[in-house]
Image (cartoon, rainbow, N blue to C red):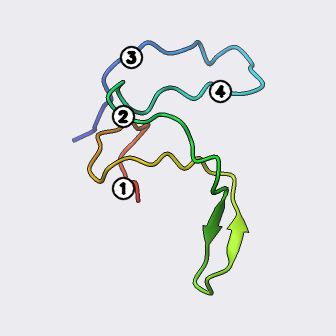
Amino acid sequence: MPRTLPATDAPDYTQAESHFWFTRPFTDAYYTWGSWYYPYGTNNNGEYLWHRGSDIQNPQNTPIVAVGDGLVV
């Protein structure tokens, strides 16, 4: 059975844009700012490597808005 996502208000992506806007992934009850003091990720060797992700710390099991199925770790 095909799965469909519910309709949401979204920009018209048929128009060329230089970037997409990052929407609030959490409700007002949760933190929505990134971690400014830890812009690194670690690898299996314990090295700190710069990454281009956005770390937003919240309690485990915080509900988020996502573009598809998956697990946030």
Judging by the rendered image, the residue that carries numbered circle 2 is 30
Earlier in the chain: of badge 1 and badge 3, it is: 3
According to the image, label 4 marks what residue?
20
The residue that label 3 is drawn on is 8
Q: What is the spatial separation of the Cα atoms under label 3 and label 4, in whole angstroms?
A: 16 Å
Which residue sits furthest bottom? 45
Q: Which quarter of the rendering shows the C terminus?
A: bottom left
Q: Which of the two marks, 1 or 3, is nearer to us in this view?
A: 1
Q: On the rendered structure, is 35 left or right of 57?
A: right
Estimate how packed mark 1 is, as few (under 14), some (14 to 19) or many (20 or more) residues with alpha carbons within 10 Å: few
Mark 2 or mark 4: name the one nearer the start of the chain. Answer: 4
Residue at the image point whose x is 29% and y is 54% from the top: 60
Please name which of the two marks, 2 or 4, marks the residue nearer to the observer: 2
Question: For mark 1, what is the residue?
Answer: 71
Foreground pick, 56 / 5: 56
In x, y percent, where is residue 43? 61, 77
Image vertical order of residue 14 relative to residue 52, above or below:
above
Q: Are marks 4 and 1 in contact (CB under 8 Å)?
A: no
Are the residues flagged by discs 2 and 1 in contact, CB closer than 8 Å? no
Three-letter amino acid code at disc 4? Phe
Amino acid identity at mark 3: Thr
Front disc: 2 or 1: 2
| Amino acid identity at mark 1 | Leu
Of labels 4 and 1, earlier in sequence is 4
Find out whether the residues at labels 3 and 4 contact each other: C-beta distance under 8 Å. Answer: no
Query: What is the spatial separation of the Cα atoms under label 2 and label 4, in whole angstroms?
Result: 22 Å
Q: CA distance from mark 2 to mark 1?
A: 18 Å
Classify the position of the N terminus by image quarter.
top left
Q: Secondary structure at mark 4?
A: loop
Give the mark nearest the N terminus, 2 or 1: 2
Place of residue 12 in the rendered image (x, y in percent of width and height, measured from the top left): 59, 12
- Is 41 left or right of 7, judged from the image as shown? right
